[in-house]
């Protein structure tokens, strides 16, 4: 790893602004903000890959005003700025890409950790960008509220990161995607501060909040987010069902979505993922469970986890009745509860598998219902064709009236000589298969990895519109070089 390329004059200005303790030049601190948590990030980190770009400094501003002043200094010195939340990006979103800049800094928002205000009448809370998921829930619970945004990266990811990437939590069917919770945004930009959101709905032109949400640090640094909150649920109840085959399962979830009967958590696994879930969660009972299901004519079990928060009894009754009519079988609360307990354990399981020499990664997309089966098959086929013998598992965890997400988990034997190339080829094959059928990302965002596929999805005009917006707020391109727009 090379030394810091931050010009001395920029370092001095930043130290005068933030204090020397909040301008970190230490190699370990810089390396710690050099990448996110994708399989390729972890492979490169384990290999000590010298080619991974490392930020020239880590900056720790204390409040939105200091974030704005940091941008002013970086603009003067033409230094690139990578906003850094929890660093859980899996698409290269926090990579220290320099673009045309001689130096780049990681702007870590960890000190923006406050609940700014709560309006219990409108049910809106303003949180600073660096607040992590559990802390956000703790702060809101003191006022009797919850956000209900619980992605698998909940323990580390931040409010600013959720907003910047249009995140979707595991209970999105009930609480909505993160962008649906956003009532207002405060951003620092090289052109000055930008505040959006004065009313719950507006016809004053396009909704620019939605330009800020999902802007991945390329259009500004989000410093505060005003969020719709809900009363803390008095009850939570999770249970498992089994459907015979993926097509029947998807049809059942579609029916629930279109009849407005989705549970707050609705997660349908395909046959392969169900086999693994049974083995991991039902343990020795798996054989008995399979025999029970076979006796009832279910040969290709697909596990459906459903969970309700808040008012349970009435909504559960309706969902259950519809699932029974769709031929699904209830298998009790054990699998629902064990899924809920283990729902943040993915990263730890991935670490263990990587230790064993496994190529293990996830990818996600979404499509309209009429394309979903074709997309599921196309991605599976592309991954298996690229990786050879591979286990490809999939689930739907976010369903809408018009379609659903697909989340794939891939396990293959790791290529000992070119593990990075092995996954890059597989991911490219999957991305090609997705293009034209679904979106390149339902909730992981664009970052560096998906940028080459963006124009196929939003068109050349769409890319030009985003570029024009970037030029308006960031004319010299200091904000997150190389992300969102390749
Ligand atoms: C194990 C694992 C599970 C995951 N599960 C989910 C899931 O269930 N649902 C989901 O939606 N995502 C998931 N993700 C992806 C990731 O957690 C999300 O994208 C998350 O929203 C990122 O938040 P963060 O604070 O870690 O942001 P970071 O990773 O730090 O940053 C993400 C992007 O946003 C930018 N950014 C961060 N903060 C700001 C800010 N304040 N202002 C402007 N730009 C900013 C960064 O520059 C970067 O481009 C998962 C990731 C992992 C590793």
Image (cartoon, rainbow, N blue to C red):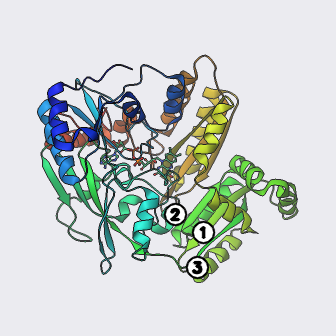
The residue most toward the top is 417
User: Residue 320 location in percent, x, y?
Assistant: 66, 75
Of mark 1 and mark 2, the one earlier in the sequence is 2
What secondary structure is marked by label 2?
loop
The residue most toward the bottom is 314
Residue 478 sits in quarter: top left
Q: Residue at x 32, y 29 (%)?
A: 97
Q: Is residue 245 visible?
A: yes
Q: Is residue 78 visible?
A: no
What secondary structure is marked by label 3?
loop
Q: Report the number of discs.
A: 3
What secondary structure is marked by label 1?
strand
User: Residue 77 location in percent, x, y?
Assistant: 14, 30
Circle 2 Cα neighbour tier, 10 Å, few/some/many (<14 / 14–19 / ≥20): many
Q: From the viewer's perspective, is 468 left or right of 456?
A: left
Q: Is residue 413 above or below residue 245?
A: above
Mark 1 to mark 2 CA distance (whole Å): 8 Å
Give me the disc on residue 171: 2
Q: Is residue 54 above or below residue 180?
A: above
Q: Nearer the viewer, residue 360 or 464?
A: 360
* Ligand 1 lies under 8 Å from the Cβ of mark 1: no
Q: Residue at x 58, y 44 (%)?
A: 347
Circle 3 Cα neighbour tier, 10 Å, few/some/many (<14 / 14–19 / ≥20): some
Q: Residue at x 26, y 54 (%)?
A: 223
User: Residue 318 location in percent, x, y?
Assistant: 61, 79
For the N terminus, the image quarter is top left
Give the residue at mark 1: 307
User: Residue 185 location in percent, x, y?
Assistant: 25, 59
Residue 473 sits in quarter: top left
Give me the disc on residue 312: 3
* Ligand 1 lies under 8 Å from the Cβ of mark 3: no
Q: Nearer the viewer, residue 437 or 471?
A: 471
């Amino acid at each position: 790893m090379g030394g810091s390329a931050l010009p001395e004059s920029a370092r001095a200005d930043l130290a005068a602004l933030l204090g020397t303790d909040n301008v970190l030049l230490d190699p370990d601190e810089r390396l710690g903000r050099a990448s996110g948590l994708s399989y390729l990030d972890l492979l490169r980190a384990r290999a000590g890959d010298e080619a991974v770009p490392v930020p020239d400094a880590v900056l720790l501003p204390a409040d939105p005003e200091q974030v704005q002043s940091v941008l002013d200094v970086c603009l003067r010195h033409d230094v690139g700025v990578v906003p850094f939340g929890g660093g859980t990006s899996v698409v290269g979103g926090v990579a220290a890409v320099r673009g045309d800049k001689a130096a780049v800094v990681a702007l870590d928002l960890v000190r923006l950790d406050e609940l700014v205000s709560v309006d219990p009448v409108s049910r809106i809370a303003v949180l600073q960008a660096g607040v992590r998921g559990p802390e956000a829930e703790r702060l809101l619970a003191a006022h009797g509220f919850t956000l209900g945004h619980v992605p698998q990266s909940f323990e580390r990811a931040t409010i600013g990161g959720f907003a910047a990437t249009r995140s979707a939590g595991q209970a999105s069917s009930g609480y909505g995607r993160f962008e649906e919770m956003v009532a207002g945004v405060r951003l620092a930009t090289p052109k000055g501060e930008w505040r959006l959101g004065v009313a719950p709905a507006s016809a004053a032109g396009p909704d620019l909040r939605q330009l800020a949400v999902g802007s991945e640090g390329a259009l500004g640094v989000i410093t505060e987010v005003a969020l719709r909150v809900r009363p803390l649920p008095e009850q939570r109840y999770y249970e498992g069902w089994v459907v015979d085959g993926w097509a029947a399962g998807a049809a059942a979830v579609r029916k629930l979505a279109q009849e407005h009967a989705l549970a707050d958590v609705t997660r349908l696994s395909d046959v392969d993922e169900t086999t693994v879930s049974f083995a991991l969660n039902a343990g020795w009972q798996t054989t008995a469970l399979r025999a029970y299901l076979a006796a009832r004519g279910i040969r290709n079990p697909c596990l459906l986890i459903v969970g309700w928060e808040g008012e349970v009894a009435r909504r559960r009754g309706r969902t259950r009745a519809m699932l029974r009519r769709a031929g699904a079988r209830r298998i009790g609360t054990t699998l629902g509860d064990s899924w809920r307990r283990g729902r943040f354990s993915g990263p730890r399981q991935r670490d263990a598998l990587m230790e064993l020499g496994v190529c293990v990664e996830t990818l996600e997309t979404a499509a309209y219902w009429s394309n979903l089966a074709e997309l599921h098959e196309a991605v599976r086929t592309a991954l298996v064709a690229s990786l050879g013998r591979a286990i490809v598992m999939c689930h739907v965890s976010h369903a809408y009236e018009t379609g659903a997400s697909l989340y794939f988990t891939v396990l293959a034997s790791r290529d000992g000589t070119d593990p990075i190339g092995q996954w890059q080829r597989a991911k490219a094959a999957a991305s090609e298969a997705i293009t034209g059928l679904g979106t390149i990302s339902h909730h992981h965002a664009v970052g560096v990895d998906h940028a080459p596929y963006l124009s196929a999805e939003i068109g050349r005009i769409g890319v030009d519109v985003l570029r024009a917006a970037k030029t308006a707020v960031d004319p010299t391109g200091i904000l997150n070089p190389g992300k969102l727009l390749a």
